[in-house]
Amino acid sequence: PVEATDDAFWDQFWADTATSVQDVFALVPAAEIRAVREESPSNLATLCYKAVEKLVQGAESGCHTEKERQIVLNCCRLLTRILPYIFEDPDWRGFFWSTVPGAGRGGGDEEDENARPLAESLLLAVADLLFCPDFTVQSHRRSTVDTAEDIHSIDSCEYIWEAGVGFAHSPQPNYIHDLNRTELLKLLLTCFSEAMYLPPSSDSSSTNPWVQFFCSTENRHALPLFTSLLNVVCAYDPVGYGIPYNHLLFSDYREPLVEEAAQVLIVTLDYDNSTSSSPTVDGTTTGTAMDDVDPPGPDNLFVNYLSRIHREEDFQFILKGVARLLSNPLVQTYLPNSAKKIQFHQELLVLFWKLCDFNKKFLFFVLKSSDVLDILVPILYFLNDARADQSRVGLMHIGVFILLLLSGERNFGVRLNKPYSVRVPMDIPVFTGTHADLLIIVFHKIITSGHQRLQPLFDCLLTIVVNVSPYLKSLSMVAANKLLHLLEAFSTTWFLFSAVQNHHLVFFLLEVFNNIIQYQFDGNSNLVYAVIRKRNVFHQLANLPTDSQSIQKGLQRKKKTPEPISRTNSQDGVSMEGSRPAAPAEPGTLKTSLVATPGIDKLTEKSQVSEDGTMRSLEPESSQPLPEGNLPSAVSDGEPWSGEASHPRRDRRRLSSASSSGQWTPTPDWVMSWKSKLPLQTIMRLLQVLVPQVEKICIDKGLTDESEILKFLQHGTLVGLLPVPHPILIRKYQANSGTAMWFRTYMWGVIYLRNVDPPIWYDTDVKLFEIQRV
């Protein structure tokens, strides 16, 4: 081993002047790092220790010379290169959390300082360096007579990187500072990535020690850094000063920083909300993080600060920023190349999810005006665009989760009634109507022409439609037909009998029709007309056979129809102009596996809406903790609820043969048990009253024209003829450790795949997910 005191040897690793992070990756190949790790571990240990020491020295001195800055950047790149190889070996994982004995720089007065684990020294140095005047932030001083201790006396809150939440001053852009921040954040993200080397556990509350320390009160820059990251992301405008094609004229140094900031932000916010019963997450407690007592709520200051944002103008800034960035790929479609196309929409969706989940005031702000539609439309665009692409299953899930969370609030359903006029080219039928129509048409498209792995999301998609249905004032004919086409597809005997949970989908759809008929009959003549036209579907359901012979016959039919849902008899019409069909993934595309998500019964809790619009929870018993050690799965036959099975290698069965996974077979008793509960009374009564009247009009007037019938239905009323309206049931998303673990695997999978230049984690032994080729 080389002695730690041999400075000439060690200095050659960082003294070189002109290197980039890409050079370091090329010069230090993976095989060499692993060889040193196995054959001369003490050299690897010394290298890490020395590199951290250089960062600490840079942070102490304030990096005044070009040479010092170069050394800091090179150490930063070297550690980014080496850390994943330390994490992949369980024997080395504790190395950064041990103290290096007697490794001080002489002086006995530093003994207490040396007691810090290496990881803590590294994280604190990076935090200091992120607010280092003339290196990563503008210097406020005119004079150059800076003394060394100034770095400790500066108030980093005055050096926040961008105006926005809690900071009004927008510093002059400086691309050198942006590049230096980006390199430091890359190192920070690499430190946090230890999480990738631990297998997914059902105990999602296991905290990441790197994140835990960095987001604790030990880090004096926690608040300004959190604010800087959030503001840099939300203030970013990829179009560049509003001039189209501007990005072609000059290079954008902001974008890499914004991406890195978004990734660091979501990782620091990886916090299991379901395990803490803290009031702070609701944003309702008072007190500041500076109190002497432990700050209430999460020890993670980033989560704490996020949950306490409360000023309207801050919410407005965040919402506008996220909406602007999410809509960026849509702008591309009608002015191709006019704006820089951003690639970090998945990180933005995770960030938006965290904002809504940790800060209920933000959620209510989003739903207070029709601004929520600026989030909805891009999400529907992504869902529609990714529906055929196996490598984007995770994107489909997070889009649906966000809509499920929003749909638990009455205001979301009300907002959907706003007419949809923005014409984003999407591969869906042309229609004239509201945002509710858009949502239903896109969901129909996902269900009928998405790939097989999306089937676990059907429950979620229909739950969203059920949640908003009592508030939908007037569905278009296109959307009404789509809902009936889904009912027709889901109520065929082979589909109902082929898996234990398939009949739930029929229950959801009937609930949608009942809600609209009972609460929004007046404006919904299109839907009523569609129900009358397809009345045989409801009669068939009411007369569903329950004897063994018919059940077998129904299942036989399945063998002849391999696709779960046919596209036939769904009048699709022409797709919107300028749209491209949703394409499957290119063969060979890399994707990362995901853990199973909990079933809809674990994911949501039922609430009843009372007369005055308030909700009360119906299921006190649902709050029982899950049994330890197993991820929840909704169905009893051992088939995981999510299309990504918990065992990614297991061959994926098509939905239609789900029964083969257990010994489950449909029995007459089983069919009877749910058939008797089908909520058909309201619809049957409606048909009983209206069908004879409509038939009479047709005979009397010799009508074949539907506009006359629609006119009749518009002016009709069923007051006093329908059963007493049922209470509205909303299934609200509830935090649970199953989704917390899903978010962790999804988020790190996205970060792994998006960091290709340099490929920080590529070809290392990650355990949190598997890397698969489509």
Image (tube, helix red, strand yellow):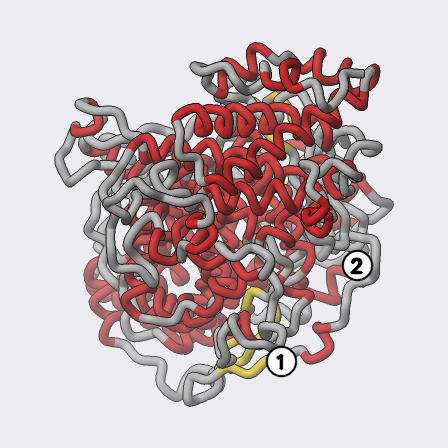
Looking at the rendered image, the disc whose residue lies closer to the viewer, 1 or 2, is 1
C-alpha distance separating marks 1 and 2: 31 Å
Which amino acid, by three-letter code, is at mark 2? Pro
Identify the secondary structure beneath mark 2. helix
Q: Is residue 196 left or right of residue 663?
A: left
Q: Quadrant of residue 30?
A: top right
Q: Which residue is located at x 40 percent, y 76 percent?
A: 689
Foreground pick, 71 / 210: 71
Q: State whether residue 99 appears in this view.
A: yes
Image quadrant of residue 252?
A: top left
> Label 1, on which residue?
618
418 on left or right of 686: left
365 relative position to 773: left or right = left
Q: Residue at 35%, 35% (x, y): give it.
A: 178
Q: Residue furthest right?
A: 663
Which residue is rendered at x = 13% and y = 35% of the image? 243
Residue 678 on image: x %, y % = 61, 68
Say what amino acid the circle numbered 1 marks. Answer: Leu
Q: Quadrant of the C terminus?
A: top right
* Of the image marks 1 and 2, the number of the one nearer the N terminus: 1
Q: Image quadrant for the N terminus?
A: top right
| Residue highlighted by disc 2 | 668
| Residue 466 versus residue 343 in the image, above or below | below
Query: With respect to residue 735, does 738 lie above or below?
Result: above
Residue 184: give its label. Answer: none
